[in-house]
Image (cartoon, grey):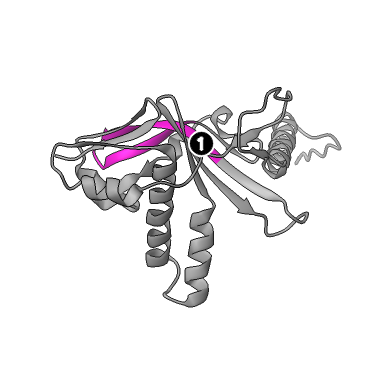
Amino acid sequence: MAFSHHSSTPGFFGIIFGISLSVLAGALLAAAHLAAKPVEVLTAEPKQPEPGVVYFVRGVKGGDWERKVAALNNSGSLVRFSEGELNSWAERLFEQYLIKTMSNGTPEGNAAAKGMADSLNLRLLGEDLQVGLVLDRAVGSVGSKLVVQARGQFTKGVLGWGYLPESGYVGALPLHKIPGALGLVTLYISMVAPELTRADLIAVGEGAFAVRMP
C-alpha cells in the first residue's frame, strides 16, 4: 500500500527558511533606509551633536600644492601637505584619473569627471584621514546629497601603499557594523598617483599629510 502525506502546515525547515527570508528582507530594507537617510554636511564640528544623527565635516581646500608636489622630486626630503593643499592636490589627481578611465575624452565626460572630482573631500583627524564623497542624488528631494565617508590610516603592503578604513558610512548606514564590509574596501594610491608607490613614508599626523620619496 502506498502512503501519501499532505500537510497544511509547513515543516521545520520551511519555517526556518521563511524566518530567514523575513530577517534578510528586513535587514535589507533597514540598510536601504539608513543609506538613504540624509547626512548633516558641515564645515565645522557641531557644538551639540544630536543623538542618532550622522555628520560629515568638510576639510578645507586651497594652498600652494604645486610647489609641494615639485618638492617630492628631491630625494629623501620629507614633504608635508596641509589639509587644504592635500585636498586641492587630491582633487586634481582624482579628476585626471576619472578623465583617463571614464570620460572617453568627450566634453560631457570631462565635465562629469570634474564634477565627481569636486565631490571628493579629505580631512586630517589626528593620525587618521577622513575620505568623503558628497554627491548629488539622482532621485529624491531637491538639493539632497548622498554622502559616502570613511576614516582610516595608510599602510604599505604587497600592492603598495593603501588606505585602510577603520570606519565608514554610506548615508547613515554604518559599514563598520556589517561584518566583513570594510575588509573589502582598500583604496590603493597607485590607482590615482602611481608615482607615490615608491614612497618611503606616507603618514598623517600633526595636522599634515607627510610624504618622503627615496
Q: Position of residue 46 (x, y in %)?
A: 66, 28
Taking depth in this image into account, of 208 and 103 the one nearest to the observer is: 208
Q: Is residue 165 magenta?
A: yes
Disc 1: CA contacts within 10 A as few (<14), some (14-19) or many (>=20): many
In the rendered image, which quarter contains the C terminus? top left
Q: Position of residue 191 (x, y in %)?
A: 34, 52
Q: Is residue 21 magenta?
A: no
Question: Residue 12 occupies which quadrant of the picture?
Answer: top right
Report the label total.
1
Q: Position of residue 207 (x, y in %)?
A: 40, 29
Taking depth in this image into account, of 111 and 171 the one nearest to the observer is: 111
The part of the chain drawn in magenta is 149-166
Instruction: Please report the residue visible at 48 percent of the width from the left and 45 percent of the height from the top.
Output: 61
Taking depth in this image into account, of 59 and 120 the one nearest to the observer is: 59
Question: Residue 157 occupies which quadrant of the picture?
Answer: top left
Q: Residue furthest bottom?
A: 106
SS state under label 1: strand
Instruction: Please report the residue visible at 67 percent of the width from the left and 42 percent of the height from the top.
Output: 35
Q: Residue furthest right?
A: 8
The amino acid on which the numbered mark 1 sits, given as a three-letter code, is: Ala
Majority secondary structure of the magenta segment? strand
Q: Is residue 152 left or right of residue 56?
A: left
Seen in the picture, residue 118 relative to 19 is either above or below; the reply is below
Q: Is residue 134 left or right of residue 24?
A: left
Q: Position of residue 171 (x, y in %)?
A: 64, 41
Q: Is residue 76 left or right of residue 47?
A: left
Q: Is residue 81 left or right of residue 137?
A: left
Question: Residue 205 occupies which quadrant of the picture?
Answer: top left
In the rendered image, which quarter contains the N terminus? top right
Instruction: Please report the residue visible at 68 percent of the width from the left and 23 percent of the height from the top.
Output: 47
> Circle 1 is placed at which residue position?
150
Instruction: Please report the residue visible at 14 percent of the width from the left and 37 percent of the height from the top.
Output: 76
